[in-house]
Image (cartoon, rainbow, N blue to C red):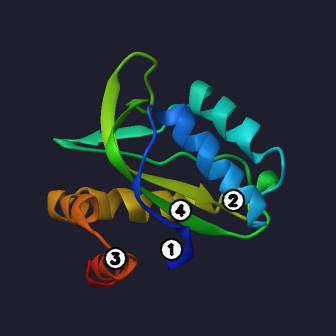
Amino acid sequence: MINPELLFLGYEAVDKNEMLEGISDWLYEKGYVNKEFKRSIMEREKMYPTGLKLDEIEFAIPHTDADYVIKPGVVLVQLKDRVEFTQMATFDDKIHARIAFILLMHKDGSQVALLQDIIGRCSSAGFVAALEQAKTADEVMAIIKND
């Protein structure tokens, strides 16, 4: 579900809101999401934080309802600098991620298996470190394929 068009390497954002707004605008311009996607993903991130910390591995998986998605996929954002997210199932624990997977699910409920797959892969410190250090789309695709 990750294709090179949905990779953002070295993405610059001062915080998660700037990152989500910028990526949402790009997704809308490219026809992946409808106009309400940005509002929805921002609201959902406030109500249901998506930051995850597995041992020392920190990443985020922002997503929203399928109603706002036109074309399914997974956006991988490698941030230039770490960005603060609130940890999942809390409202005050913070994590600092350089990797975010934005899920574009076409059907409600389809995100569960994908979330499990991403979390399983990201439980390996080597996988996340390799994504953080990748310089090209080809490198990212090879990391994902070989995991």
| Camera-side residue of 133 and 99 | 133
Q: Are marks 1 and 3 in contact (CB under 8 Å)?
A: yes
Cα separation, mark 2 vs mark 3, equals 22 Å
Residue denoted by label 2: 27
- Dots 2 and 4: beta carbons under 8 Å? yes
Q: Which mark is residue 144?
A: 3
Quarter in which the N terminus is drawn: bottom right
How many residues crowd around disc 4 within 10 Å: few (fewer than 14), some, or many (20 or more)? Answer: many
Give me the disc on residue 2: 1
Position of residue 139 measured from the top left corner of the image (x, y, whole percent): 30, 79
Q: On screen, 40 above or below 37?
A: above
Q: Earlier in the sequence, mark 1 or mark 4?
A: 1
Residue type, mark 2 in image: Leu
**What distance separates the C-alpha of mark 1 from that of mark 3?**
9 Å
C-alpha separation, residue under disc 2 versus residue under disc 1: 14 Å
Kind of residue sitting beneath label 3: Ile
Q: Amino acid at mark 1?
A: Ile
Residue type at the position of mark 4:
Val
